[in-house]
Image: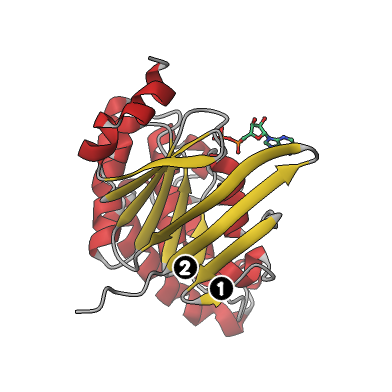
Amino acid sequence: DAPEAPLLELKAIAHRFGGFQVLHDVSFTAPPVGITGLMGPNGSGKTTLFNIISGFLTPTSGAVLFDGRDIRAESVRRRSLDGLVRTFQTPKIFERLTVAENVMVGAFKSGRSGFFAGLAGLPSVRREMSDMRAQAYETAQRFDLGAVFDRPSPLLTAGQRRLLELARAYQGRPRLLMLDEPSSGLTTTEIEVLIAKLRLLADEGIAILLVSHDMELMGVAQAIHVLNFGRIIASGTMAVVQEDTAVREAYLGV
Ligand code: ADP
C-alpha cells in the first residue's frame, strides 16, 4: 500500500529574526491520525515553528502544506476554519463566561448566528443555543467537566482550565489540534488525566501536534521530532529518541 498522505507537511522551513537564524531547514510531516510530538530544550525554536504552522509568523523560507495545500499566505482564522486549531501555553479562557458558555464558543467558529447574539437573548438563535448546550454538555462530560458545567470559569483548577480549553477546541471539530506546552502548570496527576484525554481525541480521529519540552508527556506521541538550535536532530518513537546521543547531549549537556 502507498503510505497515507500527510495532513501537515513542513518543507525546509527557515526563519530569521533580524540577523539571528532561529530555524534551519526544518522538514517533517504529521499524519492525519495519531499524535506527533515536537520536542526540544528551551530556546530550540519550538514556539517559532509553532507560530509558523498556526499562521502567527511567516517563515523566511520554506513551505507549510496542510492537506497538500500551501497555506503560507492564509490567515490564522482561515487556517482554524480549515481545521488547524491551536491552543496556548496559558489557556485562553473567557473569564466572564461559565464553563458551558466557554465550551459552546468553540462550536461557533463559523459565526453563523453568533454566540454573543445568543447570549444577548435574540429569539431567533435561542433554539439553536439549547441544542448547542446539550452538545456542549456531552463534550464537557468527556473532559470531566460535567459537574462544573455551570460554574464561572475563574473557579476552575489549572487542570480543569486545560481540559476546558481542549473541550472548546474539540467543539470546533479540528482536523489538526496543535497544543503548545499543554502540561505547563499541571501536577503529575493532572498530566495523567491530560494524557488520557489526548488519547481519547486521537482515538476519535483528530490528529494532534504536541509541542513540549516535557519528556513524560511526550511519551504519548507515536512519532517525535527533536529540535535543537533550530534543527531537527532526531526523529522516531520515544524509545528511539531517548537513546539518541545528540538528544541526550541537548537535554543533559553530556
Ligand atoms: P522555544 O519555544 O523552543 O523555547 P523559541 O522559538 O521561543 O524557542 O526561541 C528560539 C530562539 O529564538 C531563542 O534564542 C529566542 O531568544 C529567539 N527568539 C524568539 N522570538 C524572537 C524574536 N521575536 N526576536 C528575536 N529573537 C527571538
Q: Residue at x 63, y 72 (%)?
A: 78
Disc sitting over residue 188 in the figure: none
Question: Callout 2, which amino acid?
Answer: Gly
Q: Secondary structure at mark 2?
A: loop
**Is 220 located above or below residue 169 in the figure?**
above
Q: Position of residue 115 (x, y in %)?
A: 59, 69
From the image, state whether disc 2 or disc 1 is nearer to you: 1
Left or right: residue 202 compared with residue 17 = left
Quarter of the picture containing the C terminus is top left
Quarter of the picture containing the N terminus is bottom left
Question: Callout 1, which amino acid?
Answer: Leu
Q: Residue furthest top?
A: 254
Who is closer to the viewer here, 62 or 153? Answer: 62
Q: Quadrant of residue 207?
A: bottom left
Q: Position of residue 227 (x, y in %)?
A: 47, 39
Q: Residue furthest bottom?
A: 124
**Is 189 located above or below residue 15 in the figure?**
above
Q: Secondary structure at mark 1?
A: helix
Q: Which residue is mark 2?
A: 172
Left or right: residue 59 compared with residue 199 = right
Q: Which residue is mark 1?
A: 81
Who is closer to the viewer here, 247 or 87? Answer: 247
Ligand 1 contact, mark 1 (Cβ < 8 Å): no
Q: Position of residue 219 (x, y in %)?
A: 26, 39
Considering only order in the chain, which callout, 1 or 2, is on the residue closer to the N terminus? Answer: 1
Cα distance in 3D space between marks 2 and 1: 9 Å
Q: Residue at x 27, y 43 (%)?
A: 195
Q: Residues within 10 Å of mark 2 (few under 14, many from 20)?
A: many
Q: Quadrant of ligand 1?
A: top right
Q: Residue at x 38, y 29 (%)?
A: 246
